[in-house]
Structure formats: structure tokens, C-alpha cells
Amino acid sequence: MLLLAPMAPPPQDKAEEEVTLVNIIKPPPPPPPPPPPPPEPPKPITPPKELSPPKPTPLPPPPEPPPIVVDDPSPVDVPAPPPAPPAPPAPQNTLGSVDPSSKSRNPPNYPPSALRSGIEGTVILVISIDAQGNVLDIEVEKSSRNRDLDRAAVDAARKWRFNPQIENGVAVASRVRVPVDFTLN
């Protein structure tokens, strides 16, 4: 079966339709912009006037200071300088004058990176010791050319204790030179 759509809609009752008319009023066009002002006529170029350089006014000479009059003291008026005090005796704090024997001097730990790389060397330390034999300061006099070996030597030396130097029966502060060897067996 075939269904066909009707050609015109079915007739319906025509009721009064309400129709509203709308008048569209176009707004008036905006006024045209005012014309631009006329360009000003170019000003005539006047050549610059030749100015003469100002005449320098002569500066007055600076006033001379009054002379300073100094009375020369007679040779009797000048006291003789006091004699210079004798120079203090040089401290007997020379390197190596200390008995480097120690109360506790554990060998440094071999740095693992230097051990793996097979690096050997000698570090020479200059150690300042107080009157009780404690380490005050450590200087690397000669490096092993390996930072890890130098650090290990300094770290170990910080923990060392020495027998202090004895002068006239009294323990005194001193310095000692200590070589630290790092060798692989």
C-alpha cells in the first residue's frame, strides 16, 4: 500500500486573526563630521643670527697667602730623642723544634674515591700546637695534588694530640711539620 501526502492542507475554520502592523522608522543618518581645519601656512625659515662669542672677563689674580713666620729653635731647645728600646728576642717557635711524638695520632682514613682510582701521595702539614698539646691550626704546606687525600690528612690531624714543646721546664705553644703518606700495599 502506498501513502501519499495531500497537496494542500486540510481546510480549517478561519477565525479572526489579529494582525498588528509595525512601522519601522529608520533613524536619521548622523551628521557628517566637521571638515578638518585648514593647514597652517608654513612659517618662513629665518637663518640663525651670527652670535659673537662672549668676551672673557679677566680673572683677578688669586690673593697670595700671608707668609708664615716660623721662629727657628736654637739647638739647645730641641730635646734629644729617647734611645730606641731593644728589639724583643725572636720567639723560639721554629718549625720542627717540637717533638712530633704524639699522645694519640691515628692514621687518616684512605678516601674511597682515591682508593678505587689507585691514587697515592704525600701531604705535608704544618700543625700549630698549644701548650697542652692540642691542635690549634692546620696548614697544608705541600699538597698531594689530590683534594681528597689533602682533606683526609687535615681531618685526621684535627683529632691528633701531641706532646707539647718544653722550654725551661714549661710547656709552650709550638708548630710542627708532619708528613702524611697515602700508599697502597
Image (tube, rainbow, N blue to C red):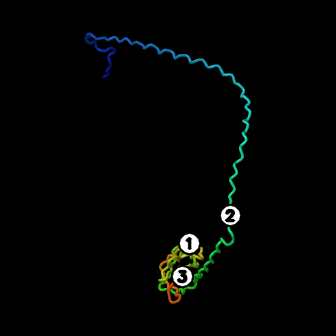
In depth, the one of 113 and 153 nearer the eye is: 153
Residue 163 position in % (x across, y down): 50, 86
Label 1 sits on what residue type?
A: Arg
Badge 2 marks a residue whose secondary structure is: loop
Gap in angstroms between the C-alphas marked 1 and 2: 69 Å
Determine the CA span between mark 3 and mark 2.
Answer: 56 Å
Percent position of residue 41, x then y: 64, 19
* Residue under numbered circle 1: 147
Find residue 38 and report its horizontal and vertical position in percent: 60, 17
Q: Is residue 82 left or right of residue 165?
A: right
Out of 51 and 158, give the one closest to the viewer.
51
Binning the other alpha carbons within 10 Å of mark 1 as few (below 14), some (14 to 19) or many (20 upward) gives few
Q: Is residue 183 visible?
A: no
Compare residues 76 and 119 and report the one nearer the observer: 76
Q: Earlier in the sequence, mark 1 or mark 3?
A: 1
Quarter of the view holding residue 179:
bottom right
Q: Secondary structure at mark 3?
A: strand
Which residue matches tag 2?
A: 71
Say which amino acid is labelled 2.
Answer: Asp
| Residue to which mark 3 is pinned | 174
Badge 1 vs badge 2, beta-carbon distance below 8 Å: no
The type of residue carrying mark 3 is: Ser
**Residue 80 occupies quadrant:** bottom right
